Amino acid sequence: MTKTLSLGYSPCPNDTYIFYALTHNKVTIPQHMIAERLEDVETLNQLALNGLLDLTKISYHAFGHLRDRYVLLRSGGALGRGCGPTVIAQGPTDMKSLRGKRIAVPGKLTTANLLLQLYGTGYEELLILPFDQIMPALKCGEVEAGVIIHESRFTFQQAGFHEVVDLGAWWEEDTGLPIPLGGILARRDLGVETIQSVDRAIRASLEYARQHPQEPRAYIKDHAQELDDQVIDAHINLYVNDFSLDLGEEGVNAVEALLARAEARGLIPKSKEPLCLC
């Protein structure tokens, strides 16, 4: 009997690139079909908090609240170096000057916000916006600064904004580890066999995209905020890497370090559940 699994992921090029083959019958999961749902990352976080998705892309911040219900897959996520969220402002400033000021973030449970809170105290005056609305809000003076992710990292300078701090670079310098941005989760109650089959299929889907790099392009452009091929390629090259194929020991260490720091600050609850079926 064939069962349908709901799969949530973002419309960003790295996700549509990774999941193209899986959602277009180029790769299959034995005895299962996939029903995809494309949403911004904070919507996915909230859907997972309500247990509404079998499989989903998630912010690692949100995963900190979901470990009792979901398990982390080894494939399909976004983790790496030089790819972290960036704080920007209309003019030159520093993080000390932004304490107590209104800052736009792409979701309360995003890793972008978690890194902002781990950077220091005094950054709790937040405006929650979809990631593509942060630069417009900053431009019209609705906020003093914004934490940008996704395609915005490649376009903020030409839009006239100034970098305050690269939170990913800060994390790397402080820990020596890559930055865990988002992972792929599966409901623990799906069972080990199904979860492992899904993990293998996601890896195969990414491998298919690497072997046929132009085939997913139309699907990617159907959902991308930026349609310029150079921006799309830069996005994929930055967020899709060997960690996307398999977290590996270094990737697992990075996730554990991020969650441990968040626990120590009381930003996420403690959990005794293992991160993944390692």
Image (spheres, rainbow, N blue to C red):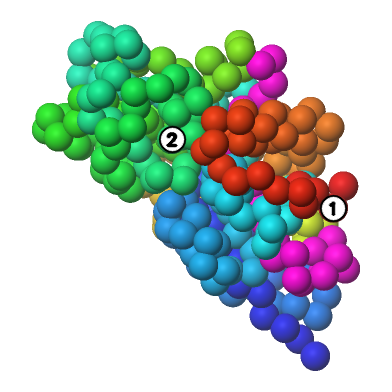
Numbered disc 1: secondary structure: loop
Q: Nearer the viewer, residue 192 or 37?
A: 192
Residue 19 placement (x, y as % from top left): 63, 57
Residue 118 placement (x, y as % from top left): 50, 25
Res. 177 in view: yes
Residue 187 located within the stretch drawn in magenta: yes
Disc 2: which residue: 113
Q: CA distance from mark 2 to mark 1?
A: 27 Å
Disc 1: which residue: 277
Which amino acid type corresponds to the residue marked 1 in the rendered image?
Leu
Q: Nearer the viewer, residue 160 or 169?
A: 169
Residue 98 located within the stretch drawn in magenta: no
Identify the magenta region.
175-197
Which label's residue is closer to the chain start, 2 or 1? 2
Question: In this rendering, would 137 be left or right of 119?
Answer: left
* Total marks placed: 2
Question: In this rendering, would 208 be left or right of 169?
Answer: right
Name the residue: 44% across, 20% down: 120
Numbered tag placed on residue 166 in the rendering: none
Question: In this rendering, would 101 be left or right of 225?
Answer: left
Task: Give the image quarter of residue 142.
Answer: top left
Question: In this rendering, would 139 be left or right of 204?
Answer: left
| Mark 2 Cα shell of 10 Å, populated few (<14), some (14-19), many (≥20) | many
Name the residue: 27% across, 18% down: 98
Which amino acid type corresponds to the residue marked 2 in the rendered image?
Asn
Name the residue: 40% across, 44% down: 108
Residue 37 lies, with reference to residue 269, above or below; the image says below
Res. 23 in view: no
